[in-house]
Image (cartoon, rainbow, N blue to C red):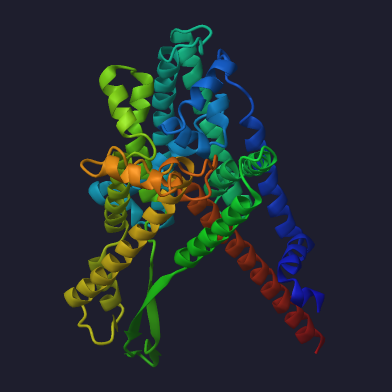
Amino acid sequence: MAEERNPILNSIKNIFSIPDLRKRVLYMLGLLAVFRVGSYIPTPGINQDALAQLFEASQGTIFGFLNMFSGGALSRFSIFALGIMPYITASIILQLATVVVPRLEKLSKEGELGRKKITQYTRYLTVALTLFQGFMTAIALERSGDQIVLNPGWGFRFMVMITLTTGTAFIMWIGEQITERGIGNGISLIIFGGIVVGLPSAIQAIVTNVQQRTWSIFTVILLVIMMVVVVAAVVFVERGQRKIPVQYAKRVVGRRVYGGQATHLPLRVNSGGVIPVIFAASIVAIPSTLGTVMPNTFMRTLSDQLAQGMPLYNLLYIVGIIFFCFFYVSIIFNPMEVADNIRKYGGYIPGIRPGHRTAEYIDRILSRLTAAGAIYLVLICLLPEFLITGFKVQPIPFIGPRLDDFLNSAGLAWITTGLGVTFYFGGTSLLIVVGVAMDTIQQIESQLIMRHYDGFLKKGRIRGRRG
């Protein structure tokens, strides 16, 4: 009865009762611990106090965005400062290039051998990107002033390039080892660990705000309820699918009959995942980043207009997410190819002619799902922006000043100032955390089912022999 009442505890018990699965989980946790230790090993030649002050003023730039993915390693400028982002960037570039470059497209269709070749190209491109990013980071730190670099020059630049490239290559190796010998996708788990590590400090910040009477208990309860609702909405949408029915006609080959079964083609609501958000956030953060590196009048003005909460920032962020949703889905999903594959194996969608009509039907449904997924991503990603900085309505042309006065007079000034939340539980971080958690749970459940099935077969064989 206790096991039926506590299925989660029962699953954890089963994980550690199976030797091979227990070994995989402990191996994964050990490598993630190595990643966390490495994020605290500093790169030589950096004034840590001056660097901390720089990052306090860089929360809206791409540096703050990358720092979130590295688990704070970039703000400490450790040997893992660039994290796994160069590998992700290289993977996205090659994934997009498979549509444009015929050689890569051919490799992607050659099965396991082709995938291994593309993986090798991804590693080479990761090293090249890391060398470039390491060099640019060293230049940016030297030009940022405040005596961040103790001994600037080419010696420091080469040292940073080699150190950061070696660190990223080691993280890439850790991710591949977790994928092969651990549980789930190692790269995703590394990003997951880098984001989740900020949860204790977020809880501590909430407690501090309550103790200092900055927040009331009612505010904290409201924030927790909002967190639960947002997480539930993310889980609901991420698991959402539109199942298109597909019927396969019967085919007689010799004395055997093939086909005759009904199945479905699943189309996810959020087919693009978190990739559109990463693209949009990176592009919108570029002006703020340039304003930090090149502090001239024009860049300062542009970065001020594109600061978090500003109308132009929100507008470009929304447009960027919607554009990259449709762009990325059009790259990874080809309705005509899917329709040809269905027709090739004798299938059809009931009521729809095979071939071009099927492709149009799938494309129409996919466009509607992508539009719904884009709206969902916009809402999830604007939530943390609102909680942190609010929506600055005063710069809006014509109606901005009057709208700002109205909100202040109506006691709704918190809409423009935000709630002062100092951590993210929405946007990119939440999408990654929830998605990786769901994927890891499914991996563990599949491992448990496989182990139980193998045990059942072994018991059946033993009973058969005894009989």
- Residue ranking furthest to the front: 409
- Name the foreground residue: 54 vs 414: 414
Kindly indicate the quadrant of the structure image that contains residue 365: bottom left
Residue at coordinates 40% horizontally, 13% vertically from top-left?
A: 143
- Name the foreground residue: 278 vs 15: 278
Left/right placement of residue 292 relative to residue 159 reads: left
Q: Position of residue 67 (x, y in %)?
A: 51, 34
Q: Is residue 23 visible?
A: yes
Residue at coordinates 23% horizontally, 48% vertically from top-left?
A: 100
How many numbered discs? 0
Residue at coordinates 23% horizontally, 67% vertically from top-left?
A: 336
Q: Is residue 290 above or below residue 255?
A: above
Left/right placement of residue 55 relative to residue 200 reads: left
- Residue ranking furthest to the left: 356
Residue at coordinates 79% horizontally, 63% vertically from top-left?
A: 17
Q: Is residue 120 visible?
A: no
Q: Position of residue 350 (x, y in %)?
A: 28, 86
Q: Quadrant of the C terminus?
A: bottom right
